[in-house]
Structure formats: C-alpha cells, structure tokens
Image: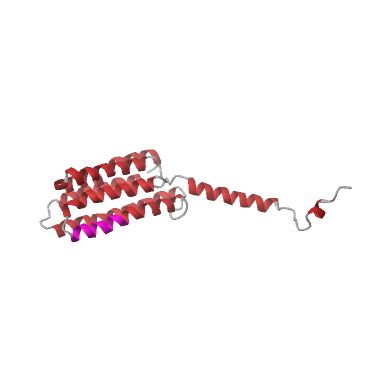
Amino acid sequence: MMPKLSELDPSSEPIALGDRAREDLRFIRRTMERGAAFTAVPGLGGVGMGCTALVAAALASRQATPEAWLLVWVLEAVVAVAIGVVAIHRKARRASLAVLSGGGRTFVLSFLPPALAGAVLTIALWQTGAHALLPGAWLLLYGAAVVTAGTFAVRIVPTMGICFMVLGALTLLWARDHGDLAMAAGFGGLQIVFGTIIARRHGG
C-alpha cells in the first residue's frame, strides 16, 4: 500500500499559488530595475549646462586674478548641477521613473566617486598653486564620472564621457595654457552636441 503524501512529510503544507506568484513578480521587478538602463539622462538639460559653460568660459578668461577665475567656475558648477538635477527630475517624472531607486540610484552612486575625487583634487592643486592643471583635471574626472555612471544609462552617455576624458588628457599634457578654451570645448561644446543627440533620441 502506497503511503500518503502527508505521511511522507507531515510538516509540509500546500504552497499558496497566489503568494508564490506575487513573490515571483516582485523578484522580476527588482531584477529589471537593477538591469534597466537609466533613460532619464537629460538631453535638453545638458544643452542648458553647455550654454552656461560657454558664458562662464568667456567670463573666466577676462578675470585678472586666479581667485576670481576660480569663483567664476565654481559658480558655473553650482548652476550646472542645479540645471542637471531639475532636468533629471522632470524627465524621470514624465517617464514615471524613480531617480533614487533602481537604475537611477545606481547611476547617481556611480557618478559620485569621480566627482568627489575631482573636488578633493581641486583643493589640492589650488593649495599648491598648480592652477593651470585644473581645467584638464576637471574635464578628465568629469569624463570618468560620466563613463562610470553611463554604464547604467543609454549607450551614448559613456561615449560622451570618453570624449571628455580624451579632451582632459590632451589639456593636461599639451594645452595647459588654454584651459578656458578647453573648458568651453568640453563643458560647452561637448555638452551641447551630446545633449542635443540625447534629446532627439531619448525624449528630451
């Protein structure tokens, strides 16, 4: 005589199919959020950041002292960050994406380490009087931040980061005396070009 299933394992209980289905859906949703590309990278916001950088480059080149020059670029960085944050928030809201979870959280956390390294390096170079190295260092580390964060974004973003890194390296090695021109080409020109591409291909 064959034993009953309950006799083989008295502690076993029937699996609730509804609970199992809900758990599977939660797992699938979490996996998709981790693996999905972050599509809220702001194209139009990048264009706006590029335009303000062109203005900053023109103003910075006319400053009589290194302190005034640095102040112009620090203010430009603050303005650019504000534009970027607002643009990302608006684009994410239109696409019903969460900025601080899933792909958005990964994007932000990947961008921060090179950006923070750039801030520390700025202080160190300024203290040693190596002002001419700042533009190249900024371009290089911003590019590194864009490349690392762009791994979790649309494909065009890492390409933009590589362009910034190449420009930064060239500036550090061969164009230290043309820092403002390099900054205009990078934070101005590259931002506008790639921002326009992103806006056209990925919805603003």
* Residue lying at the far right of the rendered structure: 1
Please determine whether, in this image, residue 124 is positioned above or below residue 54.
below
Asked whether 169 or 70 is in front, the reply is 169
Q: Say whether residue 201 is magenta.
A: no
Left or right, residue 29 beside residue 189:
right
Report the quarter where the C terminus lies: top left
Colouring rule applied to residues? secondary structure
Who's the residue at 32% across and 44% down the image?
Answer: 161
Who's the residue at 19% across and 51% down the image?
Answer: 133
Asked whether 98 or 143 is in front, the reply is 143
Who's the residue at 11% across and 58% down the image?
Answer: 65
* Residue lying at the far left of the rendered structure: 64
Q: Say whether residue 126 is magenta.
A: yes
**Spot occupied by residue 192 in the image (x, y as percentages of width and height):** 28, 43
Left or right, residue 30 beside residue 198:
right
**Spot occupied by residue 54 in the image (x, y as percentages of width and height):** 21, 47
Residue 45 can be seen, yes or no: no
| Bounds of the magenta segment | 116-127
Q: How many dots with numbers?
A: 0
Left or right, residue 27 beside residue 197:
right
**Spot occupied by residue 79 in the image (x, y as percentages of width and height):** 27, 55
Q: Quadrant of residue 202?
A: top left
What kind of secondary structure does the magenta stretch mostly adopt?
helix
Residue 70 can be seen, yes or no: yes
Who's the residue at 21% across and 42% down the image?
Answer: 170
Asked whether 7 or 52 is in front, the reply is 7
